[in-house]
Amino acid sequence: YESFNEPGGHIDEGITLINGITDEMVKGKSIDWSTVDAIMQGVDIIVSHNASFDRAFMDRYSTISQNTVWACTIDDIDWLGRGFTNTKQELLCHWHGFYFEAHRAMNDVNALIHLLTHQHYNGNRPVLELIGNAGKPLHVIHATNFPYDEVKKDTIKANGYQWNGVDKIWYKRVNFVNLESEKDWLTSVIYDTHFLGEVEEINLVDKYKI
């Protein structure tokens, strides 16, 4: 299932250059969320390339999404360990030897399926790593007790920390296997002697909700 959805405002020309979608194409169109929920009924996981971005949108309209485990093909697969230095879907697909017309829903989905099940891998296809990591706990490190410092702020931002504008704090999602090393790294960068941040364990169903 795929559908255009009128955004309620003008589509910027820069966006049209990326995906080819114009105001005329989406006029009067809307996503049928009852159809979306019917399709997803009974699924074990929802897979997305950049799950945090997609889930924030899906959870607003889909009750199935809100109560289902999400898996992220960026964060739940060690692409660097597989020899790839960038996680953009187009680049990963190109590096795996195929091209597609990107930024259209079903094209992106079909390309992602092909990428995850690519025959280049012998018994260790990305989809298996994805499924395995989808069932592992996720933790969020909150950089509490961090007095503002421009240089240190830029350092942790470059290491994947994001700004929570509501709670006014920097945070980063990490898998359990990387938790202690990430705490040690943060301590060495912004704390003097020992870790002063906070660690929150995320329920599997709540992964990628932030």
Image (cartoon, rainbow, N blue to C red):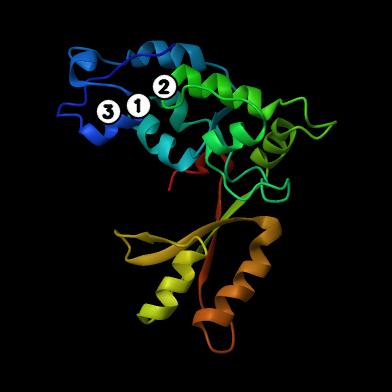
Furthest residue in direction right, as rendered = 122
What residue would you read off at disc 3? 16
Badge 2 crowding class, 10 Å Cα cut-off, few under 14, some 14 to 19, many 20 or more, is some
- Contact, mark 1 vs mark 3 (Cβ under 8 Å): yes
Q: Is residue 22 above or below residue 185?
A: above
Rendered image: mark on residue 104: 2
Q: Is residue 6 left or right of residue 66?
A: left
- In this view, the residue in front, 170 or 94, is 94
- In this view, the residue in front, 120 or 133, is 120
Badge 1 crowding class, 10 Å Cα cut-off, few under 14, some 14 to 19, many 20 or more, is few
Q: Pinpoint residue 142: horizontal percent, then vertical percent.
A: 47, 66
Q: Is residue 125 above or below residue 179?
A: above
- Contact, mark 1 vs mark 2 (Cβ under 8 Å): yes
Residue drawn at x 60%, y 33% as measured from the top left: 94
Of tags 3 and 2, the one toward the viewer is 3
What residue would you read off at disc 1? 19
Q: Is residue 124 left or right of residue 176?
A: right
Q: Pinpoint residue 149: horizontal percent, then vertical percent.
A: 37, 81
| Quadrant of res 16 | top left
Rendered image: mark on residue 155: none
The residues tagged by marks 3 and 2 sit, at their Cα atoms, a distance apart of: 12 Å
The residues tagged by marks 1 and 2 sit, at their Cα atoms, a distance apart of: 7 Å
The quadrant of the picture occupied by the N terminus is: top left
The answer, for residue 146, to whether it is visible in the render is: no
| Quadrant of res 182 | bottom right
Q: Is label 2 in a helix, a strand or a loop? A: loop
Going by the numbered disc 1, the residue's amino acid type is Asn
